[in-house]
Amino acid sequence: MKMHSLLPIGLLLVASGFAVAMKFGEKPDTPQLPGVEWVVHDGTRPQPKKVETSGVVSVAPPADAKVLIGADGSDAWTNESWKLVDGVMTVGKRPNRTKDSFGDIQMHVEWRVPADREVNGQSGGNSGIFFMGKYEVQVLACYENKTYPDGQAGAMYGQFPPLVNASAKKGEWNSYDIVFKAPRYEGEKAVEPAKLTVFHNGVLLHNAKEYYGPTQHKKLASYPDKHPESAPITLQDHNDPIQYRNMWVRELSDYDQQ
């Protein structure tokens, strides 16, 4: 298998909604999603219920974790324009990738949108976390800001909205606790899809939900013939100064045989 097949940088820049035609309340001319009446990025899809929370759930890295963003986490990344100050990393120019590659992982990460940031739909407060450089969990200001549901905070972008909207206000920290399981391949065929479990500020958004395939923009995702067994994690630059802190991962493949 090819070990470092990643989404082109251009796709990472648009995968969370640069196209202005896809807005809240509008139905775009995009493919039908399987088993539902909605299309990809459907602005007429019902908005997930808003659930008020007490905000960020902060979890210190366990002993077997690899710290990606922390007091000394800048060495984990390839893009030096993303500055790390006092344990907080701010989005810089172009995407940022980890130096190390990962497959199955548990992740904790905290993020926020600046309080004074003007947001409108997909604009102003947008970033994303791409597992293996391919499978996006959306990062977006969504406490009051409405957008198409498969593009809001915590969405499996372009595929599944979160079960609920657990977003904190702008200026406040959010947390994601995530378990990502990479797809399994036999030869050039995916025999088990990638799976995602996400808690947002302690509230469940996805429970071992299966990706249709790597994240696509305006297209129905599907699995390619070739796929890496592991690849870097990528954080998206969407021209918005999103901040990240306390990001750590545990490599679950270490425990597969136990």
Image (cartoon, grey):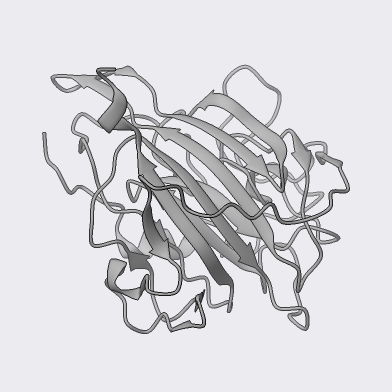
Which residue is located at x 81 percent, y 65 percent? 169
Quadrant assignment for the N terminus: top left
Quadrant assignment for the C terminus: top left
Which residue is located at x 77 percent, y 54 percent? 167
Residue 193 at x, y percent in the picture: 38, 23
Residue 102 at x, y percent in the picture: 28, 45
Q: In this picture, is 178 found above or below 247?
A: above
Q: Nearer the viewer, residue 233 or 190?
A: 233
Q: In this picture, is 199 found above or below 185?
A: below
Residue that protrudes farthest toward the front in the picture: 63
Q: In this picture, is 226 found above or below 166?
A: above
Q: Nearer the viewer, residue 256 or 125?
A: 256
Q: In this picture, is 88 found above or below 99?
A: below
- Residue 37 in sight here: yes
In this rendering, the count of numbered labels is 0
Which residue is located at x 52 percent, y 62 percent? 246
- Residue 157 in sight here: no
In which quarter of the view is residue 177 placed?
A: top right
Which residue is located at x 62 percent, y 31 percent? 206
In which quarter of the view is residue 182 placed?
A: top left
Residue 17 at x, y percent in the picture: 58, 59
Locate residue 59 relative to residue 167 in the image: left or right. left
Residue 170 at x, y percent in the picture: 77, 70
In which quarter of the view is residue 159 placed?
A: top right
